[in-house]
Image (cartoon, coloured by chain):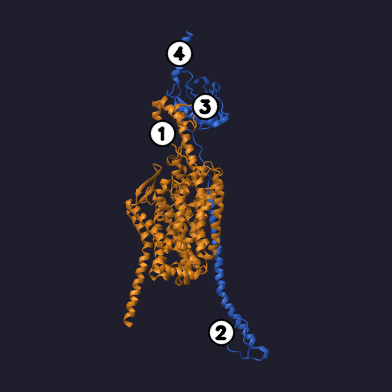
Chain colours: A blue, B orange
Amino acid sequence: MLWLLFFLVTAIHADLCRPDAENAFKVRLSIRTALGDKAYAWDANEEYLFKAMVAFSMRKVPNRETTEISHVLLCNVTQRVSFWFVVTDPSRNHTLPAVEVQSAIRMNRNRINNAFFLNDQTLEFLRIPSTLAPPTDPSVPIWIIIFGVIFCIVLVATMLLIISGIRQHRRKNKGPSEMEDSEDKCENVITIENGIPCDPLDMKGGHINDAFVTEDERLTPL
Amino acid sequence: MIKGSFLVPYIIMLVVEGMPLLYLELAVGQRMRQGSIGAWRTVSPYLSGVGVASVVVSFFLCMYYNVVNAWAFWYLFHSFQDPLPWSVCPLNGNRTGYIEECEKASSTQYFWYRKTLNISPSIQESGAVQWEPALCLILAWLVVYLCILRGTESTGRVVYFTALLPYCVLIIYLVRGLTLHGATNGLAYMFTPKMEQLANPKAWINAATQIFFSLGLGFGSLIAFASYNEPSNNCQKHAIIVSIINSSTSIFASIVTFSIYGFKATFNYESCLNKVILLLTNSFDLEDGFLTANNLEQVKDYLASAYPSKYSEVFPQIKNCSLETELETAVQGTGLAFIVYTEAIKNMEVSQLWSVLYFFMLLLLGIGSMLGNTAAILTPLTDSKVISSYLPKEAISGLVCLANCAIGMLFTMEAGSYWFDIFNDYAATLSLLLIVLAETVAVCYLYGLSRFESDLKAMTGRALNWYWKAMWGGVSPLLIISLFIFYLSDYISTGTLRYQAWDAAQGQLVTKDYPPHALAVIGLLVAASTMCIPLGALGTLITRRLKRGDTAPVA
């Protein structure tokens, strides 16, 4: 009798957990890829831990707080390491719907990964997509800040150059007229030498012949 | 574009084409002592159109070239983030995967085509002006204006900076590039000459074009600069030195390029292998870590024989990874700078630093080129008494920059990249060839080679070597004519002109035909500069006839 019961139980279990069974999920682990030399071997204890984590995830779902480790069934463990699992209800006759298992695993994915020192890529639940972490988006895009800084620097430099250019222009324009004033003053001094108003060669209104004037020469009044 | 085994044609073309033509332009400028328009008028009055054609080409170049600087600014500003924005794909709506376009293409391509350009599927759909590249374009023109504001005195000082700093960055990159994993693959590819490629005329054509444009022949700037030289200056020595420095820089830059290329190819090859390994491991539930690159082939054969049905299911997905094909994927033009390099950079450690350095160097080179181009347009404008009497030179430069910036906004629209490619391919290539051909023929046959030789001897005191005479008289014009014929036959044989458009649904480039209005623009671009030469000759002919008609009855 006992043997018959035993066979029945294992038969039912075998029925519930098979590859491609209803509500069954395939899990794939790549321990050596993730850990290299520190890889641990996959044995029955690790399987026990896995069942515990799945049961833990299911217990967080409302209405399923009574899930036990024995309700989680594993089968078809390969060398890969990969296997299939199902979660049964307390009566052990039916498996829990796939949607519930899926959402439970998704909620606790991080805890499950950490228990095995793996991540989303090395501990894969096929048909359970993982929620990817969004990239951190600062409120103001960084590039605009840098753009603004460089733009302002270039603008200020351009303005400075333009303004200094305008100033140089003005100085050049003023220059010749100032020169004329000082020459007039020099000539006034010369004419009133010795108290005698001399009548120098008419330089003010006339045209100066450059051929007869050198830089240092000043026409002495007659 | 630069492919393997380009060194041999490159060096041969440099000696046969680059040096003689450079020497010719420098000699003409030094002898005639005028800018390009005046110099050619002195050589022969019928050639006044040659100088005008150079200015027109420079004008077109100014219009479109600064967009590259705008894109370089864009990438530079985006390099200050961790992780680099082109190294990861953005997530889709419900955060379960990546955006589809990014999955099909790669993250670098997605960033270039979608985030930077926001490219439209074809040239007809223009779309709106994208404000981000437009802002960068305004900044680029502001920087150029800042440099040319004070005229050639300030440009001269800036050029020290823009010409020397890239060497520093190149050296840093050389050290980094040579220490990358897989760099030796790229270098081996570059230095091993492949006999079949040498037999292909396209390699020689590419090398000739490369030399031509990197030396800047035909723009008139060389003649203008040479006209400031002393008449007794030994321009032969200068021509040789300049071309050697130019080519060594190109080769040096190619070494850096190819080592980075080799790194990227090796990285892609290894990821391809890893994907195949993962696929086989998952399909056959093999032990993790059992399959490696070394035993891949044997295990594949074993699996094919042991599980034939399952293997034939998986077989279509197994890619044939080959390092050669990775190295041979040559990308042209702007794609090389912005897609291939960013892909290599994102895999290096401290990628932000390398990215900033790289785009900074690209900016320096680009701004340096822009300075030369704008100087070529501004010199005739500031020299003409009519315009410079009304406006100071700051205002003239400002107006030129503003006008070009406004026209450049066209290239920031969604279809702007396609128009950019049109300008890049057609604005300068044919016209420059024709201009240089006209120059060579003019000096050798219109002015007279022996007359020019005696002029040079009187000026510099050195006799002209037979080599230069042979090159100027025969080889170089023949070479340019053959280049010209090749380009024309290329256009004619492919029927209507085609371009590469980005298909967002497939995540790759597709070839499309140009619509009629784009073809009209291409024709206009080429005609605008090349027609100057015959029109100039015609104009001189007509004015001479009129003058002769006036004076005849008096005599």
Residue B483 placement, left or right of A180: left
In the orientation shown, which residue stands out farthest toward the top?
A1
Real-space Cα distance between discs 2 and 1?
97 Å
Tag 3's secondary structure?
helix
Residue carrying label 1: B317
Q: Earlier in the sequence, mark 3 or mark 4?
A: 4
Q: Name the chain letter of the residue that bears numbered label 4.
A: A
Q: Image check: B536 left or right of B389?
A: left
Q: CA distance from mark 4 to mark 1?
A: 43 Å
Q: Where is residue B458 drawn, in percent x and y?
A: 49, 71
Mark pair 2, 4: CA separation:
133 Å
Vertical relation: B5 (above or below) B401: above
Marks 4 & 1 on one chain: no
Amino acid found under the numbered disc labelled 3 = Ser
Q: Secondary structure at mark 2?
A: helix
Residue at the disc numbered 3:
A57
> For the residues marked 3 and 2, what is the alpha-carbon distance in whole angstroms?
109 Å
Question: Which residue position is annotated with label 4?
Answer: A8
Q: Which residue is mark 2?
A: A211
Chain of the residue that carries numbered disc 3 in the rendered image: A
Q: Where is residue A185 drawn, in percent x and y? A: 62, 83
- Circle 4 packing at 10 Å, graded few (<14), some (14-19), many (20+), is few
